[in-house]
């Protein structure tokens, strides 16, 4: 499975070629997602789907910028799943069920209510761990995110380690 993720990372780097910020973003989100899932003792299949989703979670950004001149979260959720589906299918290593779950996660990664499934929870937490720094969010906002979003002990551990 590590080979499949390495190949997907390479494919996403090609997809985002020339956009170092976005490539580094998904690499960081993937690293946090993998670490949180491991520490939370998530089953192997769920971890595989989660890590796949973490790598491709922002795949809709370029399409959104081209179509709408914006890459806000709701537009990413609208455009991202089809882009993820195309990329995952081109690699010929994912089952239809895996692709469907990854696309669902991509299509919900900016929806913060009714979070269901440990893969969804961890993806949101990992993305926030990176976005907090990239967006230079205030201590007050970080506290609100902690109270309203974070649920896993490992995600909370990383949040505290990074931001106090």
Image (spheres, rainbow, N blue to C red):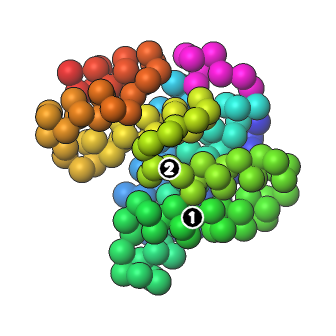
Split into 4 quadrants, where in the image is the N terminus?
top right
Disc number at residue 95?
Answer: none
Q: Residue 107: in sight, yes or no?
A: yes
For label 1, the crowd category at 10 Å Cα-Cα, with few meaning under 14, some 14 to 19 and many 20 or more, is many
Disc number at residue 109?
Answer: 2
Residue ranking furthest to the front = 114
Sequence-earlier tag: 2 or 1: 1
Residue ranking furthest to the bottom = 67
Hey, which quadrant is residue 83 in on the image?
bottom right
Image coords of residue 136 (percent x, y)? 19, 46
Image coords of residue 164 (percent x, y)? 20, 21
For label 2, the crowd category at 10 Å Cα-Cα, with few meaning under 14, some 14 to 19 and many 20 or more, is many
Q: Residue at x 46, y 75 (%)?
A: 64
Image coords of residue 26 (percent x, y)? 48, 49
Q: Secondary structure at mark 1?
A: helix
Answer whether labels 2 and 1 touch (C-beta < 8 Å).
yes
Image coords of residue 132 (percent x, y)? 28, 42
Q: Residue at x 14, y 40 (%)?
A: 138
Q: Nearer the viewer, residue 29 or 141?
A: 141
Residue on which disc 1 sits: 80
Is residue 10 in the magenta section?
no
State the extent of the magenta-drawn residues as a range.
37-44
């Amino acid at each position: 499975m590590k080979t499949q993720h390495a190949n997907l990372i390479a494919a996403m780097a090609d997809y985002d070629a020339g956009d170092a910020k976005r490539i580094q973003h998904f690499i960081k989100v993937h690293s946090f997602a993998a670490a949180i899932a491991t520490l939370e003792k998530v089953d192997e299949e769920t971890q595989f789907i989660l890590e796949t989703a973490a790598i491709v979670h922002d795949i809709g950004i370029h399409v959104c910028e081209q179509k709408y001149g914006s890459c806000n979260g709701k537009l990413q959720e609208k455009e991202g799943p089809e882009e993820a589906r195309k990329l995952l299918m081109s690699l010929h290593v994912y089952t239809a069920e895996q692709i469907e779950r990854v696309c669902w996660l991509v299509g919900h990664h900016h929806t913060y209510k009714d979070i269901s499934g440990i893969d969804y929870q961890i993806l949101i937490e990992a993305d926030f761990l990176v976005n907090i720094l990239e967006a230079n969010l205030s201590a007050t906002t970080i506290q609100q995110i902690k109270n309203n979003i974070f649920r896993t002990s490992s995600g909370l551990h990383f949040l505290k380690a990074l931001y106090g």
